[in-house]
Image (cartoon, coloured by chain):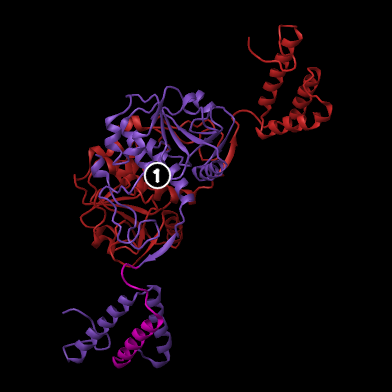
Chain colours: A red, B purple
Amino acid sequence: MSDEEDRPLRAEGANPFGVGIGSRPKPKGVGVGPKEGPGPIVILVTPQMGENIGTTARAMANFGLTELRLVAPRDGWPNERAFSAASGADWILQDAKVYSTTAEAVADLTRVYATTARDRDMVKPVVTPRRAALEFRALIDEGQRAGILFGPERTGLENDDIALAHTILSVPTSPRFWSMNLAQAVLLVAYEWHMLEVEVPEKFLRIGQTEPATQAEVQGLVDHLVTELDDAGFLRPVEKKPSMVRNIVSFIQRAEPTGQDVRTLRGVVRALTRRYQRGQPNPRPRKPQAGS
Amino acid sequence: MSDEEDRPLRAEGANPFGVGIGSRPKPKGVGVGPKEGPGPIVILVTPQMGENIGTTARAMANFGLTELRLVAPRDGWPNERAFSAASGADWILQDAKVYSTTAEAVADLTRVYATTARDRDMVKPVVTPRRAALEFRALIDEGQRAGILFGPERTGLENDDIALAHTILSVPTSPRFWSMNLAQAVLLVAYEWHMLEVEVPEKFLRIGQTEPATQAEVQGLVDHLVTELDDAGFLRPVEKKPSMVRNIVSFIQRAEPTGQDVRTLRGVVRALTRRYQRGQPNPRPRKPQAGS
């Protein structure tokens, strides 16, 4: 299962996400090493399925979390199915620590979060994953050690485990369908943590090997096109010509053209006009069309 | 697998997430119905594994997306494994539309996003899931129809599919481990969409059946405690008493006590002092300790 699940989703090459140009990752999307800065600790309490431990490790690795603790995993530890589901995030599973009780697993922590759902009549602050990420950052900067408890599939955390926590972490799902997969819950917490850590522009233009067009190149294209359109009788009536040209220029600029785009478009114009000039059959000479 | 993966993660009861007090969801976390407002359309291009189609549907349901399209799923459609992995998000699978080609699947859309990773030397704007969510909201408010292409596990989208897209959607993963599970990629996109849609306080205090303590109740507790501590000789030397009392009050307030907390704490004080007054053995009378 794990092999076929692999899929690249990150931008490589000319991008700001941290992988340099030309540095192709290994086939399974595993980079150079496991080292990341300190982050919150993921604690799976009595996890039932090895697959979910593995996909949890993968989700942690996707977003730079490294420290995994397991409280009394049902099928013992190590678990072969966990490793095969981790799709290469093995270092997290190899370093995972196993405890008999939740109390032991959190003994060295100074701040504990519990992911839960049911209303247990316990008085706790409740935070979203986004807010939790901010709190983790502040706590860790202070030298505190923060951990997040995730309960077993299906039943969730026991009341005694939740009582150990300072804060409830709750994902604001759709009220119509709120049952989440264990690893997906871990993923969202890890994702929000990572989003705080990375500085990624929310939008940028990936232009590969080429450069954005200069204004001179764009103007050259526009002049070329306008000349040809004038010849073809397209820019009429003459009082409409300025607004027609403006619309064409706006369209070109909206596409944020590269130098290569401009060269390609000039080639297109040349090809179309050459065909027209060659006197081939053209039933609508004012709007020459490509193709035979 | 799907049964055991189920786990509740949402706060029920007194919470602002949309489920009313006392409205227990059905056992599998499925609420009253599939209807949500219009959102972006999820398009899986040649998905390989039925399980991933099912977990994609579940992730969509968690965050209120409803419209799924499948381009040439490898194992045909419908697929039994998809339904068993969906953990109850059946309506999404039942309504899924199947197409032979990506071009057909996007024919009625006005804006197409492609999730991808490899640098394909195509000039496209690249956005994060967070930015994409803002764009989806704006597009849909304008009456546009937006869809997101997700490529097959392992290989990702073909260049011809990416060329159809206006925009690249890229998740800023850790550069060390960027290979994401298909459904988890869908989950993040759906999550960011939902986070825009819901109005959830990032932090609130869940207090169950009780009420926050009034200042009078807190003051009553403090007065009670200070009286007993004075009697026990704890608040000495006298010039330090004001700061000691301030510290105690601050501690109590930091816990944001409920009325029940205050009653419990007064019971604790009474119990401790009663024991002391009964003249039981107490080697350190200035710091009475509970327990035998």
Quadrant the C terminus of chain A occupies: top right
| Of the pair A157 and A254, the residue shown nearer to us | A254
Q: Quadrant of residue A54?
A: top left
Q: Report the residue marked by disc 1.
A: B35
Q: Residue at x 31, y 28 (%)?
A: B78
- The amino acid beneath tag 1 is Lys
Depth check, front residue: A215 or A276: A276
| Left or right placement of residue B193 versus residue B229 in this view | right
Q: Residue B168 at x, y = what percent?
A: 53, 34
Q: Position of residue B239 (x, y in %)?
A: 43, 91
> Does residue A62 lie above or below A211 as drawn?
below
- Element marked by disc 1: loop
Can you give x and y, in whole percent of width and height, for residue A10 in the image?
Answer: 47, 36
| Extent of the magenta region | B207-234
Q: Is residue B181 visible?
A: no
Image point 60% across, 36% down: which residue?
A: A205
- State whether the magenta stretch is mostly helix, strand or loop: helix
Question: Does the magenta portion include B179?
Answer: no
Which quadrant would residue B241 be assigned to in this image? bottom left
From this view, report whether residue A45 is shown above or below residue A209.
below
Q: Is residue A106 left or right of residue B15?
A: left
Furthest residue in direction right, as rendered: A238
